[in-house]
Image: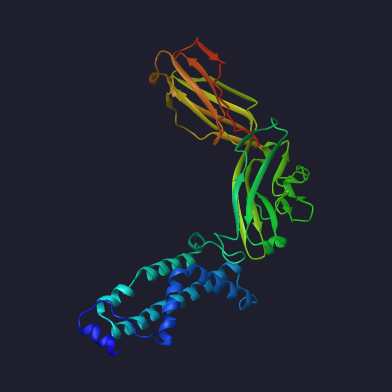
Amino acid sequence: PRQLHTCRHHGQLHCPSPPSPPLAHSALVLQTWSRRYPCLALAIATLFTHKFLWKTTGIPAPQRFRILSSFLLFCFLVCVRMLDGILWIRCIRHQQHSLCYHQIGLNMSPTVFLIVLLFLTITGNVPAVCGSVSGVTDAGPMLQIVEMRVPTVVEDGSATSVILDCDYVLRSPDKKSELVVQWYFQNGSSPVYQWIPGKRPQDLGVLKGRLNLDYRASNDPHKRHRALEILKPTYELSGVYRCKVATVEEEAVAARTMIVYTPARNLEIWHQKMSFDAVNVTCRVEGISPRPKLQLYRGDRPGVEMDGMPAEVVNRRGLYDVTLYRVVHDRSLRQETIFECILSIPATQYQIARRLIYYPGPAPIRSSSSSSSISSVAFPSLP
């Protein structure tokens, strides 16, 4: 101590440090180690507590990890700051203030890092910073549907089969024995397909007898029968399909729409005189599914859509007959007018057009009808 006093009295900057008390020395070692390896300390503490103290609780593993990590990280942060305070007091008692700030300082980088790490832990993104400890950390949900593949549009009778796939990931190996895969159709509360790993798949409801139950989507025994292979899909199977993958603690759901359409059996357009100066233009489609959209236009394309009464719709067991008509006065028309009926199915590129040429005036009425059509059908390649 006398040499230290003499050294400081002469203004020397690099004076020998006094012997470190045991508490201060331990604090310095722990502080240095904790600043260098905060993620490792967090992982070890969380793993120990998770395995030996919380294993018997009813809290799901991902939530249990986040609660433990948040609590331990908070305690870790408080301890580091307390140790900083101990070392700061010890330093300023024996050294100059500037040297203490240089050696220890109010270094906020560990605090800022730990606060960010605490936030990431609470939100479940801690593996992105610290990596993962097998069986403890989770990079998001433990059960997640990563991709659902469903054909968007299929023509009735054009395909021998279609594949509806639902790929998922389960990050908890001990939960794979509890896995259940179910498919639902439309808003139904009962599944139309169910598979439990280790058991044979079941076809139910509207898909009874319409699936290839031997189809395998993967060689993984816990993903083998996750998908549907629908044989010869028809218009009755057009709608929304929901895939549900569940364990005792978690579930994941995804939905896609598949349209199975039936082309129109017949589409025609004609006109009929209602009076001396009025004409009724009618467009009718028969035997189409799902419910189509009919539009009447006057004039060359793009033309003007004609407003009027809603279309008359008849549903014959899923096949639709739709009639649309408009009444037009001759005085509002030119000497020669083109009327065009456009048929389309929403959410598809299926479209057909029919047109006629009308000459206003009294009888004899000259008119001609063209059976030419404009048709465009485009579908994605089936799996």
In front: 49, or 98? 98
**Residue 327 % position (x, y):** 47, 26
Kindly identify the residue that appears in the image at 63 percent across and 52 percent down.
168
Is 280 left or right of 172, judged from the image as shown? left
Give the colour scheme shown: rainbow
Instruction: Give whichever of 98, 85 is nearer the camera.
Output: 98
Residue 114 vertical position relative to residue 301 in the rendered view, above or below: below
Using the rendered image of the protein, determine whether residue 57 is visible from the camera's viewpoint.
no
Q: Position of residue 114 (x, y in %)?
A: 42, 69
| Res 207 → quadrant | top right
Quarter holding the N terminus?
A: bottom left
Q: How many labels does the image show?
A: 0
Q: Report the front residue among 304 and 200.
A: 200
Relative to 20, does residue 117 appear above or below in the rendering? above
Q: Say left or right for 286 vs 7.
A: right
Do we see residue 238 in this rendering? yes
Seen in the image, is 175 located left or right of residue 80? right
Residue positioned 28% across, 80% down in the render? 15
Where does the image place residue 374, in percent across and percent down from the top left? 54, 21
* Residue drawn at the location 73% of the way across and 46% of the way down: 206
